[in-house]
Image (cartoon, helix red, strand yellow):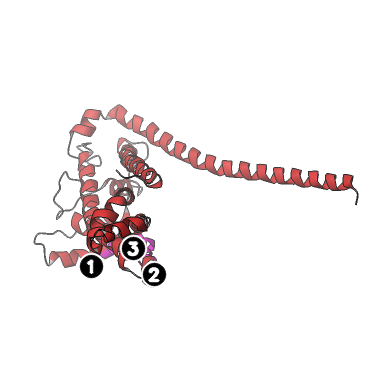
Amino acid sequence: MNAQSIRRDGLDLCRKRRLSERVAAVALGGCAAISILTTAGIIAVLLTETVSFFRDVSFRQFLGDTEWTPLFAHQRFGIWALVSGTVLTSAIAIATALPLGLLAAIYLSEYASVRARRCLKPALEILAGIPTVVYGYFALAVVTPALQHVIPGLAGFNALGAGIVMGIMIMPIIASLSEDAIHAVPDSLREGALALGGGKLRTIRNVVLPSAFSGIGAAVIIGISRAVGETMIVAIAAGQQPRFTFDPRVPIETMTAYIVQVSLGDTPAGTLAYRTIFAVGTTLFVFTMALNVASHFLKKRVMKGGTL
């Protein structure tokens, strides 16, 4: 084999590699474009139908009323009835998930052995794989009857039972992400605090948790976003009675549950009542986008090693 043939073979190999790299780049770019176009399409549909909705309903009605009865003969379009239900169940979920998830994260990162951590963390994350419809019927058939023995006046459908089970559902998210943030704190900070005479618990409280605050905050925001967008649990266990209240004992309706209710097919397409699901969907989109932006900001702070 002479030098010319070797050179020719080398050039052919380089061309093949360049071609394969270009194909890979085009394929990856196409995947990225599909996700962007899908998001743009969703936003376009939401905005188009929402604009049509606000041609018949004023912003004053939408933001200034507290009654939501678009499916009744006397129609009212106060979005706050659905927003209050969403905020109430999400607040109960975070109040349940945050202490349990954070304590689990502290144990896994600071107290558990390597073997226990390898076993317990995957077992905890199994909760995230349970279908939400199972959680919904668990809240309706188990949690609510148990709470009725303790809390007088608790309705069969209520925000409290649904919120508690939502908290159990999002607890693995908060626990896993918080554990990762706590585990990433440099050991030198722990050793320095211990060398100064601080006990293990005081070191965790005064050094480790403040250093991991950004990661823990991001985990909480992601958990809130997950709770705000939850559908099946609240649709099954919280009831379908939109009301402006913060009483967790009574039936309420969230934005996601209302979308499910109207999307069942009983409401004719193209009507004002049908277009309400897009107005509610746009409101929900704004909520979740704000939470995701805040989460992204906190994640960037974690990657840079900063704290808030």
In the picture, which quadrant includes the C terminus? top left
Specify whether residue 170 is in view: no
Label 2 belongs to which residue? 114
How far, Cα to Cα, is label 1 from label 2? 35 Å
Is 129 magenta? The answer is: yes
Q: Position of residue 170 (x, y in %)?
A: 31, 57
Label 1 belongs to which residue? 142
Q: Mark 2 is on which residue type?
A: Val
Disc nearer the start of the sequence (1/2)? 2
How far, Cα to Cα, is label 3 from label 1? 32 Å
Disc nearer the start of the sequence (3/1)? 3
For this orientation, the residue located farthest to the left is 152
Q: Position of residue 279 (x, y in %)?
A: 31, 37
Specify whether residue 232 is in view: yes
Residue 131, relative to residue 28: is it above or below? below
Q: Helix, strand, or loop for circle 2?
A: helix
Q: Mark 3 is on which residue type?
A: Ser
Residue 21, relative to residue 58: is it above or below? below
Residues under numbered marks 3 and 1 in contact, where contact means CB atoms less than 8 Å apart = no
